[in-house]
Amino acid sequence: MLLDPGPGTLIRCAKSRPPLDPTQLDAIILSHQHIDHANDVNIMIEAMTNGGFSKKGALFAPRSALEDDPIVLKYVRDYLNEIFVLKEGATYTLGDIEISTPLRHIHPVETYGIVFKTPRYTISFIVDSRFFPDLIDKYKKSDLIIINVVRYDGKGGKKLDVDHLNLEDVKKIIKGIRPKQAILTHFGMTMIRSKPWEIAEKIEKEIGIKTIAASDGMEFDLEKQLL
Ligand SMILES: [Zn+2]
């Protein structure tokens, strides 16, 4: 599965060592249509389906990404086996994985966080959002959370009025959910400059939940790393 194919996804796949083969994908998921999350969706549908010659796979996307700002081109939609329109409170299945979207996030466009339930793990992808308490309640039963931390808004700093999480919000969420592990990702420049790996260490010390900062190309082995 590929979640949120932002700009450069196909090139990243090709440059990865060993390369990641897009024809092995079963599904592409868009949390919302913003360009940093969806720019390469058409390219990746083409790549997944061998330019449309091998009709296959599924696309999961909010209605808004398909209709209001139709970021998915019409001609590539025919290359897919199925298109699932994401809705709040819905559950979908893909093989033995249950995919659910328990909550519409507060973000300028229709946006959903994604929960993946495998036979062994529950993994929540807490995507772009303004902070609100449901982010804790709806993702409470997660073994692993992956969370988009765009803003740092350091100590005493004024919170910028945007529909994104900052570090304090993310700490509240990790504390509230208490997963086995948390992975921070989707850093804006204020986070990058503040060294996300050091921030992750501090969170782990402060809250007592294993926390790591994602980096480009990072692999995470569920069986070995999520004990
Ligand atoms: Zn966004």
Image (cartoon, rainbow, N blue to C red):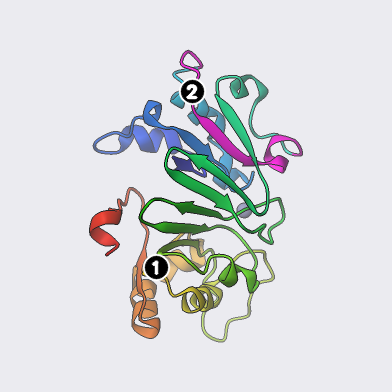
Q: Position of residue 138 (x, y in %)?
A: 58, 66
Instruction: Name the mark on residue 188.
Output: none
Q: Which mark is residue 196?
A: 1
Residue 71 in the image, given as x and y percentages of width and height: 66, 35
Instruction: Tell me which label, 2 or 1, sits earlier in the chain.
Output: 2
Q: Is residue 220 above or below residue 39?
A: below
Residue plotted at (24% across, 36% down): 18
Q: Secondary structure at mark 1?
A: helix
Q: Are marks 2 and 1 in contact (CB under 8 Å)?
A: no
Q: Nearer the viewer, residue 166 or 140?
A: 140
**Residue 75, horizontal then vertical, whole percent:** 63, 19
Residue 199: within the magenta?
no
Q: CA distance from mark 2 to mark 1?
A: 37 Å
Which residue is the extreme one toward the top?
53
Vertical placement of 77 versus 91: above or below?
Answer: above
Determine the residue positioned at 34% across, 82% down. 205
* Relative to 37, 214 lies left or right: left
| Residue 6 visible, this orientation | no
Along the viewing direction, whichever of 44 and 92 lies nearer the viewer: 92
Q: In the image, what residue type sits under mark 1?
A: Pro
Q: Quadrant of the C terminus?
A: bottom left
Q: Indicate yes or no: mark 2 CB to ligand 1 under 8 Å.
A: no
> Which label sits on residue 56?
2
> Does residue 90 lie above or below 128 as drawn?
above
**Measuring 34% from the left and 66% from the top, which residue is drawn there?**
212
Q: Residues in magenta?
A: 52-68
Question: What kind of element bears circle 2?
Answer: loop
Does residue 197 appear left or right of residue 86 in this picture? left
